[in-house]
Every structure is written in structure tokens, then in C-alpha cells.
Image (tube, grey):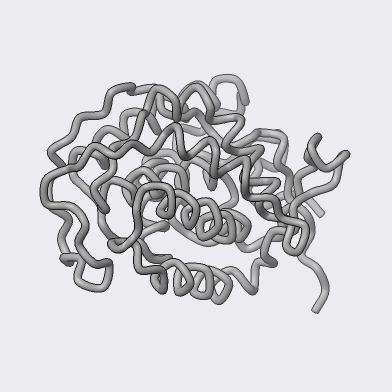
Amino acid sequence: MSDPYFYIDAPVFRNRLGTKDKTTLNRIEAELSRANMMLLYEKGFEDFSPAGLCEIHFALFGNLYDWAGQYRHISLEKPEQLLCGRSVWYSRENDISEDLKVAFSRLLCVPWAELNREQFVYEMARMFPPIWQVHPFREGNTQSILMMMMFFAEHYGYSVDQTLLVSNAGSIRDALVMASLDQFSECEHLEQLLLDIVRSTLIEGSGKSLSHAPDLPEKRNGHLKDKTMFTHDNKNERSKAPNPV
């Protein structure tokens, strides 16, 4: 089955610019998402929910793709070198909404404000992979979730070493793969990476309970150290025809 997100005559995502050249689209996507990331960071963000994840995705890619911020309506598979060519078992398109609700409900059950840094990172390395494994969007999942993780750590008073985050983006994605294998999941590698990236420097006004987060996010006091945070999800990701019910 052909991918409805692609142009009929080119294996390139349908986009608002109308370009059918993959190299050009990838370059423009990277530049736009970096600029949009800066705008979102300056605006601030505190909505750690499925709707909040959609908001991040739309903020990053909304001026390029019509489907930004919307759940995909096809199944996905992506051969992983770490898995000898097999794919992580991403959520079926009909299960995305419910799977995200379950994953975020688990996130909200953790008493984050009561944890020290090591405990906080331990839980992050186990609570965010199930969100990533849902892979709710056709493209841009890893960038959106990593940005939410950055906002999440800062919400609870930690600073994020963005230089390390950028330089280890590929390793973090590999670690998310290994932490998304159900009963065979291995979260220790992601935990070790996050221990280096999430620092103890407190940010004024942080540590608020998620259940009492304001409806409108406050402007952040921090500044993005590196504008080249992430490019785009692995472009080898491919669609799969929806599984029969």
C-alpha cells in the first residue's frame, strides 16, 4: 500500500512548500524546526499530556506539514540496526489515543517533586520510552518527545545540558529503542545518558505539581544554549499498510 503522506509521484512528504526534492525538504524542515523550537522555548511550556505533545509537534512542524500535531492514520514500522533489522512495535493507528493516555497517566502518578536527581532520572528513563513507543505522528516523534523531556526536567528545577543533548541525540534515540522492547526493555543506557544531561541547577519557580500547572505557560527565564538542537526523525522510517482488524 502506498504511503498517503507522500506525493503520488515522489517518495517525499506532502508539504506546504510543494517541493518534491527530499534533500531540499529535509534541509528546510531542519531549519524551520530549529527556529520554531526557539520560539516555543521562549514562550514556555508546561502541558505534559497527549494534547501537550501534539502542541509541541504542531509548533515544530505546523508551518510545513498539514498533519502536524495530528495522530497518524497508518501503521509504522522501521528496521533498526540495533534489532537486526526488526522494528520497534509501535502503536497501531487505532490505539494511539488510548496508549498515550495510559503512558501519560503513569507519568503523572510519579511523585516527581519528592525525588532527588538520581531518582528523577531513573523514573524519566522508564516513563518516557512508553510515550515514545506510541510514535503518534507520521514524522517528528523523537524531536517532539525529547523537547518535552527537556521542558519536563526544567519544570522540576533541573537544568538541561543542551550541548550534550545535541551531541548525543543519536545515542538517545538508540537508547529509546532499547527501552521500548516490552518485557525485554533495557533502560539503563538511557538512564546513564540522562544522568549526564540533566543537571541539578535549580530554576526559580520550578517544582510545581503537574496537576496544578497553569493553563497558560509562563515565559521561561532560561536561554537555549544551542539552536541546533535536533534535525528530524530517522528518515528511514517507513509506513506500513494498516493491519486488518
Q: Residue furthest bottom?
A: 245
Q: Which residue is at a point 51% across and 56% down the rendered structure image? A: 128
Q: Which residue is at a point 38% across and 65% down the rendered structure image? A: 49
Residue 26 drawn above or below residue 54: above
Quarter of the image where the N terminus is located: bottom right
Return the x and y of residue 112 as percentages of the image width and height: 34, 62
Residue 216 drawn above or below residue 202: below
Q: Residue furthest right?
A: 84
Residue 208 drawn above or below residue 157: below
Return the x and y of residue 156 as percentages of the image width and height: 26, 53
Q: Which residue is at a point 80% across and 68% down the rendered structure image? A: 243
Return the x and y of residue 126 as percentages of the image width and height: 55, 57
Who is closer to the viewer here, 161 or 92?
161
Question: In the displayed structure, does residue 59 sit left or right of residue 105?
Answer: left
Who is closer to the viewer here, 75 or 23?
75
Return the x and y of residue 77 as percentages of the image width and height: 76, 51
Question: In the displayed structure, does residue 69 sit left or right of residue 23?
Answer: left
Who is closer to the viewer here, 229 or 9?
229
Question: In the displayed structure, does residue 178 sit left or right of residue 245?
Answer: left
